[in-house]
Image (tube, grey):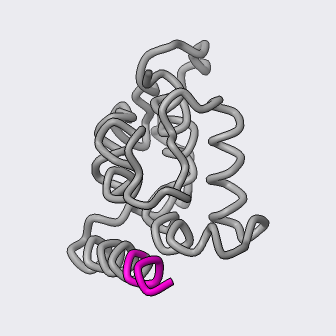
Amino acid sequence: MRLILSTVVLCSISALAQTAAGKAPPPPATSAAPAANKTPAPPPAKATAGPAPATAAGPKLDGAKLYLERTCVACHGKDAKTPILPNYPKLAGQNAAYAEQQMRDIKSGARSNAQTAAMKGIMPLVADEEIPVLAEYISKLK
């Protein structure tokens, strides 16, 4: 029990340190600017197996980079197969839709139990648009 609490505290401290250092994802962009002098947005791109496409809001999202930057690696291991505790899940090869839903549920509070304590401290670092990119990335790991 002491090890689990220590891990939760360390993961939460890591998340807070990143937030304090300005590494937290920016809030979603709002369209408060007038519509005049704006070029129309291109049509949505079809889904691809690669990284998320670049958008007007920012550069292309890279799942491998997000996995490191959002501190997933700290608890789930560099290869996503060697978690620091035996009750933490191995993420490599996990179904993308399932992983995405679990992350969304933990972030929103819909999934809340003792197993989600560490993730509750981490999910504020993950922007909503980054969740499917992370889910797709871990699904492709073998």
Q: Can residue 110 be seen by looking at this rendering?
A: yes
- Quadrant that contains the C terminus: top left
Where residue 55 sits, quadrant-wise, is top left
Residue 138, horizontal then vertical, whole percent = 48, 33
Residue 120, horizontal then vertical, whole percent = 56, 72
Q: Residue at x 46, y 84 (%)?
A: 5
Q: Is residue 57 left or right of residue 64?
A: right
Q: Is residue 137 magenta?
A: no
Taking 118 as reference, is 102 above or below it? Answer: above
Where residue 8 sits, quadrant-wise, is bottom left
Where residue 43 sits, quadrant-wise, is top right
Which range is magenta? 1-7
Q: Can residue 29 be seen by looking at this rendering?
A: no
Q: Nearer the viewer, residue 25 or 140?
A: 140
Q: Nearer the viewer, residue 83 or 96?
A: 83
Q: Residue at x 55, y 45 (%)?
A: 131
